[in-house]
Image (cartoon, rainbow, N blue to C red):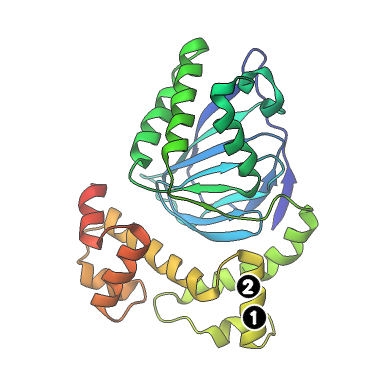
Amino acid sequence: MEFVVDKIHVPNKHSFITRKLEQLEKRPPRIHSHKNFELNFVVSGSGRRIVGSHISSFNSGDLVLLGPDLPHCWEVLEVEADAPSVCLVVHFYENIISSDFFNIPELEEVKELLKQANRGIWFKGEQIPRMQHHLERLLGLQGLESYIELLKVFHLLLKMQEREFLSFPAACPAVYAKDLEQINRVYEYVFTHIQEGVRLEDAAELLHMAPASFCRYFKKKTRQTFMQYVKRVRIGLAAKMLAETDKQITRICFESGYNNLANFNHQFKAMMGETPSDYRKNFR
């Protein structure tokens, strides 16, 4: 798995740039880092997200704020010709947190939020669609109007209390290169067998570990237990099918690896905040 240190160019007389990125085909995963703060919003697409020491699945609506030097990668696993993966990305120029840009008392909370971003912050909740609206507006604005819209973005981020820290602060890239190769073998196993059944013993055997040792290793490297990861993959797969197909919920339940509809409904609501039927209705 490739690791690259990038240089993000922010044009002169600009404090930040906003871009819409589309991926039309599946590509090899490319983990990278840069000196810029980054706000990343997934409009459409699904796959695996790597942020520092944390690895999990992502779907549309994924919103993450990253600090400088934090390795990251959004690996798209499925791309359809008529439905490319799309994300909106904001990059700030290097050292912006110590510049005059935020050097006023009213933005002290924003500066504190940016300091916390060295661990990667995953934002969730009902205000996600509003964030997409503001980021899409940023694409077409310049000058003072873009600055005002950016303040609205930060204001909304501060209001979103449902958030999760994803990783330890940025560390030496060599650490990730060594462990990600091993973890990626586990990912491939989970995604290949998610519908027919995933066994802890089989995953541990891939890394030549006893189940207990494997569980400790996986949690240390990904900040989640193996079964929590499997659950996220299952629910992510179910959410994708609910959003993109007309399959019956009972069928989706079984195709995402569950053998009990009541348990599937309970697990889906616990993770997504709404029932499968409500998720499908609200998504559309």
The residue positioned 51% from the left and 73% from the top of the image is 190
The residue positioned 51% from the left and 49% from the top of the image is 122
Where residue 176 sits, quadrant-wise, is bottom right
Q: Is residue 7 above or below residue 282?
A: above
SS for callout 2: helix
Residue for badge 2? 218
SS for callout 1: helix
- Amino acid identity at mark 2: Phe
- Amino acid identity at mark 1: Phe
Residue nearest the viewer, comparing 268 with 249: 268
Q: Are marks 2 and 1 in contact (CB under 8 Å)?
A: yes
Residue nearest the viewer, comparing 84 with 47: 47
Q: Is residue 210 above or below residue 115?
A: below
Q: Residues within 10 Å of mark 2 (few under 14, many from 20)?
A: some
Checking the image for residue 214, the label placed there is 1
Residue nearest the viewer, comparing 129 with 107: 107
221 on left or right of 89: right
Picture coordinates of residue 194, whole percent (x, y): 44, 74
The residue positioned 79% from the left and 53% from the top of the image is 172
Residue nearest the viewer, comparing 174 with 263: 263
